[in-house]
């Protein structure tokens, strides 16, 4: 059986397709053509869409960009507004704190000034010259404790054969001049971790407490001055000594007019301080007057009174006679001191007085110191309270060492114990 060449190939290769590569190539070209057509269609469609809708797309993109920019601007504006608001709040807070600090500074300066004034007034009250005082050695001081014994209590006492009055502790000067505990004068330490407003508030409350205590101290000072002034005026009036009128009376002399309401913007503390200053000035005047009134002892308080004022049995003639003073026992050479300020009018030997010193204190008052063993002042000399005038002796008409002490008004002798008891009343004992 004869086979062709093609048949023989098929006979030997029954499963081999000799046309397959050609068919595959044709299919590939078809795919490429299809893809090309698709790409060209898409490109042409895109070009056509761009050409047709270009302006709208550009407008959309521009609008979108504008909205984004506006959104960002709005956010920035809101942030800037918040920042400005916070800055304003901070400035307001800072301004409030600054005002509070300035107010605290002014109040602190005012408190310090008032404290100095109170201290000066209290010191003047403590050193007031209206209270006659003596130390244990017999030195007589116009006011305050003796320099050699700071804080020593005064011990004036009247001369009496039976009773010795001891005054209570003086409250007026010691009350304001005593030191205050540091815990009451210092503001509490502030915690730096606290907010500024809290610290400023605590400082303000501390200054309020200080001002309250200052007002209380000023009230006590005013009460002390008023009480002391009233006591001094009463005692001087009992002694017949003309005291200067109160400062208020000076201001209302020979004035008048309709009564109209007055609204004062002055601080009540300053008004009260003005009254206290006026009282301090009045007390200074009264102190100068009391300095010239013999309400102090010429010898230490322990001296025994050997003979009182008035009728007595004369030691020489053994008959009743008038004794124009009091006799104070002492050792020869003991110091006799001036019981008030004045000018020496007699400093010489005067018959029965022996060595005598007489001091004129003004207002008709005079004192005499007799039987001295030595005179330590000169006629015409001005002496101060407590200044030595002589030494105790037994010159003249005397039976032994003692001091003959007299108080005279307009040349007439009066009982010296009346003035010595007045001195105790001036010092606080009723």
Image (spheres, rainbow, N blue to C red):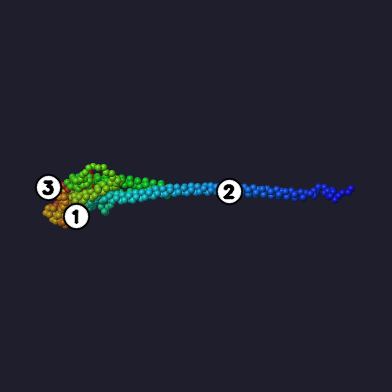
Could you tell which of marks 2 and 1 lies nearer the N-terminus?
A: 2
Q: Which residue carries the number 2 mark?
A: 55
Tell me the residue at 18%/55% (across/down): 382
Check if mark 3's residue and mark 2's residue have beta carbons within 8 Å.
no
Viewer-nearest of labels 1 and 3? 1
Tell me the residue at 33%/46% (across/down): 211
In space, the residues marked 3 and 2 are separated at their CA atoms by 144 Å
Q: Which residue carries the number 3 mark?
A: 322
Number of numbered discs on residues: 3
Sort mark 3 into few (<14), some (14-19) or many (20+) by Cα contacts within 10 Å: few
Q: Name the one closer to the observer, 113 or 346.
A: 113
Tell me the residue at 11%/50% (across/down): 316
Q: Residue furthest right?
A: 1
Image mark for residue 169? none
Sort mark 1 into few (<14), some (14-19) or many (20+) by Cα contacts within 10 Å: many
Element marked by disc 1: strand
Is residue 66 shown left or right of residue 399?
right
Is residue 109 shown left or right of residue 246?
right
How far across and down, in percent of the image, does residue 153 sit? 26, 49
Q: Which residue carries the number 1 mark?
A: 383
How far across and down, in percent of the image, does residue 77 sit? 48, 48
């Amino acid at each position: 059986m004869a086979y062709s060449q093609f048949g023989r190939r098929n006979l030997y290769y029954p499963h081999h397709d000799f046309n397959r590569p050609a068919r595959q190539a044709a299919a590939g070209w078809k795919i490429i053509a299809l893809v090309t057509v698709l790409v060209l269609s898409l490109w042409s469609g895109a070009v056509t869409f761009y050409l047709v809708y270009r302006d709208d797309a550009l407008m959309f993109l521009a609008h979108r960009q504008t909205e984004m920019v506006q959104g960002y601007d709005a956010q920035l504006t809101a942030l800037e507004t918040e920042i400005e608001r916070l800055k304003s709040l901070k400035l307001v807070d800072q301004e409030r704190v600054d005002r509070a600090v300035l107010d605290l500074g002014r109040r602190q300066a005012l408190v310090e000034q008032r404290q100095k004034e109170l201290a000066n007034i209290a010191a003047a009250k403590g050193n007031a010259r209206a209270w006659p005082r003596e130390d244990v050695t017999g030195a007589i001081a116009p006011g305050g404790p003796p320099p050699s014994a700071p804080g020593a209590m005064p011990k004036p006492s009247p001369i009496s054969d039976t009773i010795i009055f001891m005054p209570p502790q003086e409250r007026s000067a010691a009350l304001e001049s005593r030191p205050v505990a540091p815990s009451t004068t210092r503001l509490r330490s502030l915690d730096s971790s606290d907010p500024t407003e809290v610290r400023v508030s605590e400082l303000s409350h501390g200054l309020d407490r200080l001002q309250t205590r200052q007002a209380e101290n000023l009230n006590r000072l005013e009460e002390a001055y008023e009480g002391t002034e009233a006591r001094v005026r009463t005692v001087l009036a009992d002694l017949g000594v003309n005291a200067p009128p109160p400062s208020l009376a000076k201001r209302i002399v020979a004035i008048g007019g309709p009564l109209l309401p007055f609204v004062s913007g002055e601080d009540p503390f300053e008004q009260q301080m003005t009254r206290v200053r006026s009282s301090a000035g009045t007390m200074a005047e009264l102190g100068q007057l009391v300095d010239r009134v013999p309400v102090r002892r010429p010898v230490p308080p322990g001296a025994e009174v050997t003979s009182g004022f008035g009728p007595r049995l004369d030691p020489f003639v053994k008959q009743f006679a008038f004794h124009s003073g009091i006799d104070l026992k002492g050792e020869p050479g003991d110091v006799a001191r001036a019981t008030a300020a004045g000018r020496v009018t007699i400093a010489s030997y005067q018959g029965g007085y022996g060595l005598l010193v007489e001091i004129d204190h003004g207002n008709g008052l005079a004192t005499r110191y007799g039987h001295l063993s030595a005179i330590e002042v000169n006629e015409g000399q001005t002496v101060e309270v407590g200044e030595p005038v002589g030494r105790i002796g037994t010159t003249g008409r005397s039976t032994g060492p003692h001091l003959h002490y007299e108080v005279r008004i307009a040349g007439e002798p009066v009982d010296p114990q009346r003035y010595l008891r007045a001195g105790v009343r001036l010092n606080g004992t009723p």
